[in-house]
Image: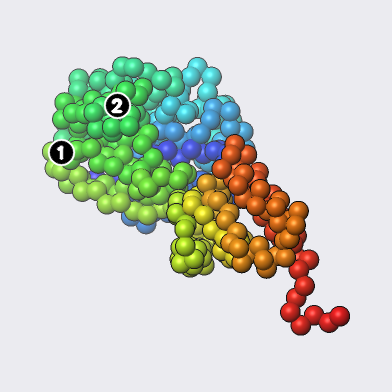
């Protein structure tokens, strides 16, 4: 029996430029921390090896410090780590992998499989790697698996990075193709894949692990690794997803039209916590009171969340007659408010809404308060 921990798409060194600097820094750090968690899981579960199916690094140009930190994060597991390059970190003649070797950063128990050569790992299984040596290929780099010899009596494990043809509908015509029946054609006991950032099974013996730390606003079952147990040659693999991710990425697109919609969204925002990365895109319309309530709840949630990205471009501000009367917007000022409200239907809708909100806040600050002394 063998046990493996299958992971992929670490994207070490990724820069999250769409976020504020402190949030981007925390998300950058999370990718090192998840490698440490993977090492801990591998040790706790006493696996025979960790398989990393490509895109270990996000860019060829990551710093030397980032390279060293990544390999340091793997120290918690003393067994074999088996890594292949993916499309983000392909094994070019000069690459992040060649720099890692020159730096002496690769520990003895880490094998960077930069060539398609079969190898026996710890006398437990035969590994057939299909490293990418350029960012995009249009031939199936796993084709050689079928003719590759393996040691008698040992399971055959494939390790590749690319797109299974005809299975992942969004990527049917993408580069780096992998035959849908590769596991059967090559008599593989398990085919460990990377490239798809969510966990996905394509047949009994073929799985994408997904990225262990979620990195995008897409519900694709990411943030985990796969614990794979194989009883022996020909036995079906038993695959157990293991949660690894620190942050939960969520995308909300509420449509607001009545006061209860605002209240419901405020209640949800009140539940946002430190591990949430939230993108909020509001649509519809709300009055001034609703907008102020939403603003307050959003500001509070931003302080609790790891990151909150707000997009209110499609949210129309509709002051009621009561709002305008309460602001004492008479004469020219009242006409300006009405003009700005109407301009939200034009090309400068976002600018008009912001101006309307700014003017309303100024008027609200200057309005006389009940009970104020003369």
Instruction: Determine the residue positioned at 31% across, 39% down.
Output: 208
117 or 120: which is nearer to us?
117
Q: Position of residue 112 (x, y in %)?
A: 43, 31
Image check: 13 left or right of 37? right
Instruction: Determine the residue positioned at 61% across, 67% down.
Output: 322
* Type of colouring: rainbow
Quarter holding the C terminus? bottom right
User: What separation in Å lies between label 1 and label 2 (alpha carbons)?
Assistant: 31 Å
At label 1, counting other C-alpha atoms closer than 10 Å, the crowd grade (few under 14, some 14-19, many 20 or more) is some
Q: Which residue is mark 1?
A: 233
Whether tag 1 and tag 2 are in contact, CB under 8 A, the answer is no
The quadrant holding residue 117 is: top left
Mark closer to the chain start, 1 or 2: 2
Q: Position of residue 31 (x, y in %)?
A: 51, 46
- Quick check: 152 above or below 326? above
Mark 1 lies on a secondary structure that is: loop
At label 2, counting other C-alpha atoms closer than 10 Å, the crowd grade (few under 14, some 14-19, many 20 or more) is few
Q: Nearer the viewer, mark 1 or mark 2?
A: 2
Instruction: Determine the residue positioned at 15% across, 30% down.
Output: 184
Q: Which residue is mark 2?
A: 172
- Quick check: 342 above or below 175? below
95 or 282: which is nearer to us?
282
Image check: 75 left or right of 26? left
Q: Position of residue 176 (x, y in %)?
A: 35, 23
347 or 145: which is nearer to us?
347
């Amino acid at each position: 029996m063998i046990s493996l921990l299958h992971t992929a798409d670490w994207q070490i060194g990724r820069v999250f430029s769409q976020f504020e600097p402190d949030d981007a820094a925390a998300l950058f750090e999370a990718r090192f921390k998840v490698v440490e968690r993977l090492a801990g899981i591998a040790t706790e579960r006493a696996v025979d090896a960790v398989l990393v199916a490509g895109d270990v690094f996000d860019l060829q140009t990551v710093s030397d410090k980032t390279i060293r930190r990544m390999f340091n994060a793997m120290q918690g597991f003393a067994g074999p780590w088996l890594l292949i390059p993916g499309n983000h970190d392909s094994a070019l003649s000069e690459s992040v992998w060649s720099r890692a070797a020159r730096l002496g950063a690769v520990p003895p128990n880490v094998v960077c499989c930069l060539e398609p050569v079969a190898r026996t790992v710890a006398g437990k299984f035969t590994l057939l790697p299909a490293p990418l040596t350029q960012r995009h290929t249009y031939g199936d780099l796993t084709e050689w698996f079928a003719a590759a010899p393996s040691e008698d009596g040992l399971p055959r494990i494939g390790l590749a990075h690319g797109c299974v043809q005809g299975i992942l509908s969004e990527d049917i015509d993408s580069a780096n193709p992998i035959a849908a029946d590769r596991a059967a054609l090559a008599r593989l006991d398990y085919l460990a894949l990377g490239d798809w950032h969510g966990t996905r099974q394509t047949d009994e013996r073929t799985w994408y692990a997904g990225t262990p730390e979620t990195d995008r606003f897409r519900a694709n079952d990411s943030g985990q690794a796969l614990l794979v147990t194989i009883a022996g040659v020909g036995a079906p693999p038993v695959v157990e997803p293991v949660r690894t991710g620190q942050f939960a990425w969520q995308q909300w697109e509420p449509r607001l039209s009545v006061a209860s919609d605002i209240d419901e969204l405020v209640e949800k925002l009140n539940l946002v916590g430190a591990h949430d990365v939230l993108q909020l895109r509001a649509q519809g319309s709300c009055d001034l009171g609703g907008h102020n309530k939403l603003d307050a709840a959003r500001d509070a949630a931003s302080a609790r969340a790891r990151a909150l990205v707000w997009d209110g471009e499609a949210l129309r501000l509709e002051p009621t007659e009561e709002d305008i009367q309460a602001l004492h917007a008479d004469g020219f000022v009242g006409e300006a408010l009405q003009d700005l409200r109407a301009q939200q239907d034009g090309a400068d809708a976002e600018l008009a809404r912001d101006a309307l909100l700014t003017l309303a806040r100024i008027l609200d600050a200057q309005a006389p308060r009940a009970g104020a002394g003369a």
